[in-house]
């Protein structure tokens, strides 16, 4: 179980770095509303204002804090039923985050394909 927590922590800490390592120059879109909900280009910050970048980082921070809080609660919980409930809650949070990252990756791929045409 210790290995799982360490692996999760490493993944959460390395994710922001891996996403920014291939950043390109921001390209302004003709439709500013289109760029609000999605990350475009090959890097996280492409087509984002400073406010959007900050908002994204805050959301990532909240996710990480929630994950750490749940981990601490799981580790300190003595009641096996409550411990299992907390684990399930954390697992659902991880699944949701994974789905969001997968969707983000698909959006980046679509955007790249559109620009190559």
Image (cartoon, rainbow, N blue to C red):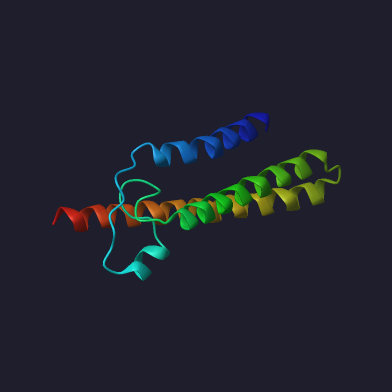
Q: Observer-nearest residue: 65 or 29?
A: 29
Report x, y in % for residue 54.
Answer: 52, 52
Can you say which quadrant of the picture contains the C terminus?
bottom left
Tell me what residue is drawn at x 37 percent, y 70 percent.
Answer: 33
Furthest residue toward front: 50
Q: Nearer the viewer, residue 71 or 84?
A: 71
Q: Describe residue 39's horizontal placement relative to residue 25 as left or right.
A: right
For the residue pair 63 and 96, the one nearer the viewer reads as 63
Give the total number of marks visible in the rendering.
Answer: 0
Q: Position of residue 34 (x, y in %)?
A: 35, 68
38 sits to left or right of 16:
left
Q: Indicate the quadrant where residue 96 lies.
A: bottom right
Residue 21: horizontal and vertical position, in percent?
38, 36
Q: Nearer the viewer, residue 82 or 98?
A: 98
Question: With respect to residue 12, does 95 lie above or below?
Answer: below
Q: Residue at x 58, y 52 (%)?
A: 58
In the rendered view, does 69 fall on the left or right side of 41? right
In-image side of 83 versus 15 (left or right): right
Residue lying at 53% horizontally and 36% vertically, measured from the top left? 11
């Amino acid at each position: 179980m210790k290995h799982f927590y360490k692996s999760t922590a490493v993944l959460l800490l390395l994710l922001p770095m891996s996403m920014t390592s291939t950043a390109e120059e921001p390209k302004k879109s003709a439709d500013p509303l289109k760029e609000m909900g999605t990350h475009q280009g090959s890097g996280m910050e492409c087509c984002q204002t400073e406010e959007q970048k900050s908002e994204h980082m805050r959301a990532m921070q909240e996710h990480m804090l929630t994950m750490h809080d749940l981990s601490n609660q799981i580790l300190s919980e003595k009641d096996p039923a409550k411990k299992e409930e907390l684990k399930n809650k954390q697992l659902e949070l991880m699944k949701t985050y994974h789905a969001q990252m997968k969707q983000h990756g698909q959006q980046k791929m679509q955007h790249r394909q559109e620009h190559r045409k």
